[in-house]
Image (cartoon, rainbow, N blue to C red):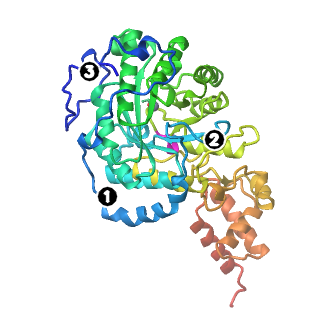
Amino acid sequence: MPTLTTTTNPTPQPTPPEISPNEPGNSFISNTHPGAANPGNLPTNPTNPPTNPDDLPTNPTPTPQSLVPLIQTLNKINLPNLYAPRHNGHGVPSEPMNDRVWIFDTTLRDGEQSPGCSMTVPEKLLMAAKLVELGVDILEAGFPIASQGDFEAVDAVSREYPWAQVAALARCTKLDVERAAASLTKARRPRIHTFMATSDIHLKYKFRKSREQVLEDIVAAVELARSYVDDVEFSAEDGARTDPDYLEQVSRAAVAAGARTINIPDTVGYSTPEEYGALIGRIVNALGDTAVVSVHCHDDLGLAVANSLAAVQAGARQIECTINGIGERAGNCSLEEIVMILKTRHDRYPFTTGIHTEHLYSASQLLTSLISFGPQPNKAIVGRNAFAHEAGIHQDGYLKERTTYEIIDPKSVGVPEGKLVLGKHSGRHALKKRCEDLGYNLSKDELDFVYKEITALADNKKGLMDEEIADLAKLSQQVAQPVGD
Ligand code: KIV
Ligand code: ZN
């Protein structure tokens, strides 16, 4: 274990400093760290005894009473599944590595830190309940040094779901790592997720540090994190724009220092599937079975899901993602999309996740109710129109056989049923069916009447509401009644 030197106050402060790049004075550095000196080493165990977690400051948040029944129900539902051992005690999956992909949800951290998405602790707890029900493997609940609320969120999720694998984010600084460790004391399967940028552009402008200095900070942080928990993840921020030789060196060093998951983020969403797949393949080959390689893709070019998929094909076995794809700027890899690709196209991507897909829609809806925006209507899987058919030809085919125009059964993602939207492209067949669904069995004349009215109306509207259709169906029956009846 290196000697940690720091110019910051070694006692974690109740009100942590504003998050800023690692300043020279805001990090710990060892000039003699063995992992840094020889980053190709195999993993070592930290030699210092773990600090007693009870000595660390905690800040318990009582569970809001209104959430208790929900949480109790969810606890019962999920116990058997979540208690199943998934790791061999060192953060490495005990199941065969060849096809199981770990879903690391960061809705409550990367997602929550984006504009319009901040959540209170009770809101995060509510969302955590849904994520647990959904079956995410790792739940990143916050960035404890960033705010008191984030600290409390990690602590509260750890208390409510002690069996869940809860992650807390920390920069590669002593203060951050200690704060993350303190927030996780109640988690039975805690993960400290420590990160530091590794690209030259970040080193030059953000840190003003050399590659050697950054490597030392990383190794020291991972070792410190390992002194608190067995399960440590290291992320090489801006990994996709990092010199691959240096990225490999950093990855080996982090593993040697005790990290069991190495995450290579495409922090600025710049990479393309071929490029990113090749980079991930290189790191997978370099690390062999000493660590799980993870990916974390941002969607600046709309490629977050495609890049994550390419990475899995190249050997990555953890995907970091969010519900509705929320996250910094254009967002993160969308959980529902990547999971449904792996499920729907299992023929081409023979990988499995532990996600109970029938909860995807309700997870999306819940998140929408907690933050300030929902997915766009045409968003894959969870958008309002994802299973809506308007064109008459499509509706006709769909009514004859759903799979003519639907590749996913809406029920498999928790959407009650495919929707036929009645607009100017719709046909009589769909209209008749909708009227029946609304309780009107129309004669041919009645249907003709409604059809004529709706076609005229739909020309000026984006789609017709069920109430409008029901009104017309009712009217058609009155109009068709014999005079004097
Ligand atoms: O985008 C990113 O690089 C991150 C890291 C903290 C994992 O969010
Ligand atoms: Zn991110």
Q: Nearer the viewer, residue 258 or 409?
A: 258
Of callouts 3 and 2, which one flags the residue occurring earlier in the amino acid sequence? 3
Count of numbered labels shown in the rendering: 3
Q: Tell me the number on the disc at residue 63.
A: 1
Contact? badges 2 and 1 (CB < 8 Å) = no
- Under tag 1, what secondary structure? loop
Looking at the picture, how far across and down is residue 390, in whole percent? 69, 53
Of callouts 3 and 1, which one flags the residue occurring earlier in the amino acid sequence? 3
Q: Main secondary structure of the magenta part?
A: helix
Disc 2 residue type (three-letter):
Arg
Q: Is residue 149 above or below residue 365?
A: above
Q: Nearer the viewer, residue 438 or 398?
A: 398
Looking at the picture, how far across and down is residue 164, in whole percent? 45, 49
Residue bounds of the magenta highlight: 322-326
Q: CA distance from mark 3 to mark 1?
A: 34 Å
Q: Quadrant of the N terminus?
A: top left
Q: Quadrant of the C terminus?
A: bottom right
